Amino acid sequence: MYWKKLLNWSKTPVSQKFILLEGSKVNLRTKKLEDAELDYEWRTDPEIAALDATVPINISFSNYLTHFEDEIKYPVPWSIKFAIETKGGRMIGNIMYYDIDPIDKEAEIGIIIGDKKFLGKGYGPDALKTLLNYIFDTTDMAKLYLHTLTTNKRAQKAFKKIGFIEDRKVRRDGMNFVKLDIIREDWQLAG
């Protein structure tokens, strides 16, 4: 693989403990350097970027790898990132919670299934359930929320199916989003 040529294995990151969360269809695990190649592939794909309401990145892989390595070596407390893997160990996407607000006890969720073969097959909702269980079991977060494009009906249906409730419409950067949220008490009652 191309990334092996660029990685300096003497710089093994040790600043973040390894976490493995088991869902019914997927496992979530701490991000690692070997994820960079797939992450880069997904972040440069126009179709995936459109689903994520972003533009494809336009930097070289070596520049991306430097940034990626820094994120792993020096994690920030307001953004926790996981890889989504099938039970067979194949990385198919990413999920994170970020903009963690310890005062209001809320955070935003972000998820992308980058491997298009796994879209619409229940992997995303299982990843979300697994992450929500982890957050509500290990933190004092009271509310989690996410944004999705108003045109992404499949994602909205999946989010609502696991308990997110539509809060309001939001316009950002010329695009229309639906904000959905879930509070700790509702998640625990549904569980």
Image (cartoon, helix red, strand yellow):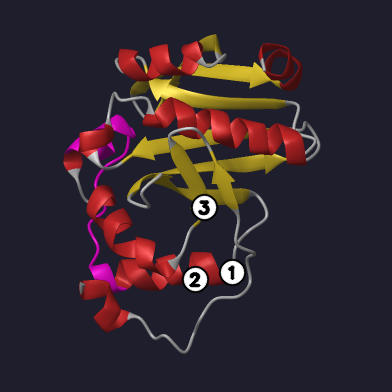
Q: Residue furthest bottom?
A: 10
Q: Which amino acid does label 2 sit on?
A: Asp
Say which residue label 3 marks: 29
Boundaries of the magenta span: 47-62
* Picture residue at 73% right of the left edge, 22% below the top: 184
Q: For the residue labelled by badge 2, is the local secondary structure a helix, a strand or a loop?
A: helix
Q: Is residue 134 above or below residue 64?
A: above
Judged by depth in the image, the label closer to the viewer, 3 or 1, is 3
**Quadrant (top left/top right/bottom left/bottom right) for the N terminus:** bottom left
Q: How far is mark 2 from mark 3, CA to CA?
A: 18 Å
**Quadrant (top left/top right/bottom left/bottom right) for the C terminus:** top right
Q: Is residue 108 visible?
A: no
Judged by depth in the image, the label closer to the viewer, 2 or 3, is 3
Q: Residue 70 carries which label?
A: 2
Give the x, y percent position of residue 73. Answer: 55, 72
Callout 2–callout 1 Cβ contact below 8 Å: yes
Give the x, y percent position of residue 3. Answer: 27, 73
Q: For the residue labelled by badge 1, is the local secondary structure a helix, a strand or a loop?
A: loop
Dot 3 alpha-carbon crowd within 10 angstroms: few under 14, some 14 to 19, many 20 or more: some
Dot 1 alpha-carbon crowd within 10 angstroms: few under 14, some 14 to 19, many 20 or more: few
Q: Specify whether 187 is left or right of 117.
A: right
Say which residue label 1 marks: 74
Give the x, y percent position of residue 150. Answer: 35, 14
